[in-house]
Each structure stands twice: as structure tokens, then as C-alpha cells.
């Protein structure tokens, strides 16, 4: 009994660590290769174990091809564009700053669901959480600071755009993907497979072999980002969903921004100010406040009128990697 309880939470911690370290690995690999090359290798390396896992579960079906247009959209929103925006942002910003800004992903998913699905509770608690969360994003970006360079602003915009893409992908999943009843393992395989094809066709191969001249960069890219941060992280995620449920598993997304902040400061020696810590706390507090508004709204409904639980916006995503 003790083992069955402790094992899921060990995997929970491993998943949070893998996603949190992606900011560090992106920064190390970015010294040698370009953002598009990072994304290309990451997606392909992440696809291989996921594809093998899907084959072992026998969840891939030829009849799924009729939904190809949905898989293409998801491959762009939640893989190709999302990863490229983050890789570009991390190349322009300190990894700690990028990690902090990534904490805004649940904020964007909330806004997207409220606008397009009208499924989020709009009340004082949720609006307050949203304002607190985005105040943290603004505090990190500091657009009023004359010391902020165009590179900093562009990097912040890239991370913000990537976060917005993920938020939209959650909405797209709930509206078009979830009703299909396809296994999440299969969905993620199609998503990463299509993203791999897109990136291999459109990718930049000029100088990519330079990655092998730096073992730290090569290890960060192939093992840290690809195999572990994408492939293994995915399998951990769905193992947890099956044991802990979607809502508890979704809470793992609150931890990577903190790990990104710590690794940037402690390992890369990036400067972390008190305002950075306050901003990160504001983003996470705002996210938790919004989540509590969901729980309060769900609990206030009577059993006869309550809709079936879908685990919240974040938990619905078929293939979410930071």
C-alpha cells in the first residue's frame, strides 16, 4: 500500500523536474544551434519513445486519418509554433525569466476558454486571480524600464505568444478533439509525428552538426529536451492521469516556473531580483486563485445540474509539454 501511494508522487516530482529543466537545457543547447534546430531535434527525439509507447498500447487506427486536419492544427499550436516561440524567447532572455513567464500559460488558457467556450466561471475570485497573474507578467517584462532592450522585449513577446498558442490549443482540444473519443496516447503520437514531418521538411540543417562539438549542448538537446523532457515526460504525464486523475496531475504545471527560476540563478548564474520572485509568486497565486474559483463554482452546482467533470482546461490537453 505504501508503495502504491508514494510511487505516483515520485513520478509527479520527476515530471515537474523534467519540465522545469527544459529552460536550462534550451539555454545550453542554444549556445551552439539555432532555435529552429533545437525544436526540430527535440520534437523528433520526443516522438520516437511516444510512438513506440503508442504501438505497444495498440491505440493507433487507420480510421483516425479522417481527423487529420484537427491533428495538423494541434501539431502547430501545441508543438511546432509553441516550442519554436519558447526556444526563440529563451535564446533572447535569461532562462530564469523565460521560466517565470511560462507560468502565465494557465492564465491564457483561462482567457481563451472564457472567450471561445464560455466555460470558465467569471466572478470576483477568477477576475482577481487573472489580474494578479498578469500583473506578475507585466512586472517581469517591465516595459517602463529604460534599461530593457529590444532583445528583452522580443524575447518576452515570444514567450507570451507561445503561452497564448498553448492556451488556444486547450480550447481547440475541448471543442474539437475531446469529442472524438480518441486515446490521448494516439493523439499525442499524431501531434508529434506531424510536427516532426513539418520540422524535418522546413528545418534548418546549416551548421546543425556543430551540436556534436559540445557534449553539454548535445546532451541537453537530445537527452534533456528530446528524450526526457518530451518523450519520457509525456509518458509520466499520462501515467499520473490514470492514477491521480486529471485535476491533481494538472497541478504539476505550477512547479516548472519555479524550477526554471532556480536553475537559471543557481546553475547559469543569472541575476534574480526580489521583483522577479514577487512576480513569480503573483503569477502562481493568480493561477491558484482562478483554479479555486473553478472548484467553488463546481461545488456550488447541485448534483442534478452539474456537468460531467472534465478536469479543468489544463488537464484536457492531449499532449502538454513545457
Image (cartoon, helix red, strand yellow):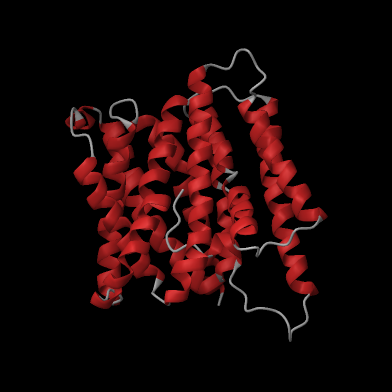
Q: Residue 277: which quarter of the image?
A: top right
Residue 149 spot, x, y in % from top left: 53, 16
The extreme bottom residue here reads 304
Compared with 218, 269 (above or below) is above
Q: How many marks?
A: 0
Residue 35 spot, x, y in % from top left: 34, 33
**Residue under the image location 63 percent in, 48 percent down:** 107
Q: Is residue 238 visible?
A: yes
**Residue under the image location 68 percent in, 36 percent down:** 136
Q: Is residue 94 visible?
A: no
Q: Nearer the viewer, residue 144 or 136?
A: 144
**Residue under the image location 37 percent in, 30 percent down:** 28
The extreme right residue here reads 124
**Residue under the image location 50 percent in, 39 percent down:** 161
Answer with left or right where residue 306 lies relative to residue 176: right
Compared with 3, 267 (above or below) is above
Answer with left or right where residue 189 lies relative to residue 104: left
Answer with left or right where residue 99 lies relative to residue 144: left
Compared with 299, 17 (above or below) is above
* Quadrant housing the N terminus: bottom right
Residue 320 spot, x, y in % from top left: 45, 56
Amino acid at each position: 500500500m505504501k508503495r502504491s501511494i508514494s510511487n505516483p508522487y515520485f513520478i509527479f516530482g520527476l515530471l515537474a523536474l523534467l519540465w522545469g529543466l527544459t529552460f536550462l537545457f534550451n539555454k545550453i543547447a542554444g549556445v551552439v544551434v539555432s532555435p529552429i534546430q533545437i525544436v526540430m531535434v527535440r520534437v523528433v527525439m520526443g516522438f520516437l519513445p511516444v510512438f513506440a509507447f503508442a504501438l505497444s498500447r495498440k491505440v493507433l487506427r487507420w480510421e483516425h486519418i479522417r481527423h487529420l486536419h484537427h491533428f495538423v492544427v494541434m501539431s502547430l499550436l501545441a508543438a511546432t509554433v509553441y516550442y519554436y516561440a519558447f526556444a526563440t524567447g529563451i535564446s533572447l532572455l535569461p532562462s530564469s525569466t523565460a521560466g517565470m513567464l511560462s507560468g502565465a500559460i494557465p492564465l491564457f488558457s483561462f482567457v481563451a476558454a472564457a472567450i471561445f467556450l464560455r466555460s470558465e466561471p467569471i466572478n470576483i475570485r477568477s477576475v482577481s486571480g487573472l489580474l494578479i497573474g498578469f500583473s506578475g507578467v507585466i512586472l517581469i517584462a517591465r516595459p517602463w524600464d529604460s534599461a530593457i532592450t529590444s532583445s528583452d522585449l522580443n524575447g518576452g513577446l515570444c514567450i507570451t505568444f507561445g503561452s497564448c498558442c498553448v492556451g488556444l490549443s486547450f480550447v481547440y482540444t475541448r471543442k474539437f478533439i475531446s469529442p472524438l473519443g480518441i486515446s490521448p496516447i494516439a493523439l499525442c503520437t499524431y501531434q508529434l509525428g506531424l510536427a516532426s514531418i513539418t520540422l524535418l521538411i522546413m528545418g534548418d540543417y546549416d551548421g546543425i552538426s556543430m551540436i556534436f562539438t559540445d557534449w553539454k549542448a548535445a546532451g541537453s538537446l537530445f537527452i534533456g529536451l528530446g528524450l526526457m523532457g518530451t518523450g519520457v515526460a509525456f509518458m509520466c504525464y499520462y501515467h499520473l492521469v490514470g492514477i491521480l486523475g486529471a485535476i491533481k496531475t494538472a497541478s504539476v504545471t505550477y512547479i516548472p516556473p519555479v524550477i526554471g527560476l532556480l536553475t537559471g540563478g543557481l546553475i547559469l548564474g543569472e541575476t534574480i531580483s526580489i521583483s522577479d520572485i514577487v512576480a513569480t509568486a503573483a503569477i502562481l497565486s493568480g493561477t491558484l486563485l482562478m483554479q479555486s474559483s473553478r472548484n467553488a463554482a463546481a461545488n456550488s452546482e447541485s448534483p442534478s445540474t452539474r456537468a460531467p467533470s472534465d478536469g479543468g482546461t489544463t488537464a484536457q490537453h492531449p499532449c502538454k509539454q513545457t
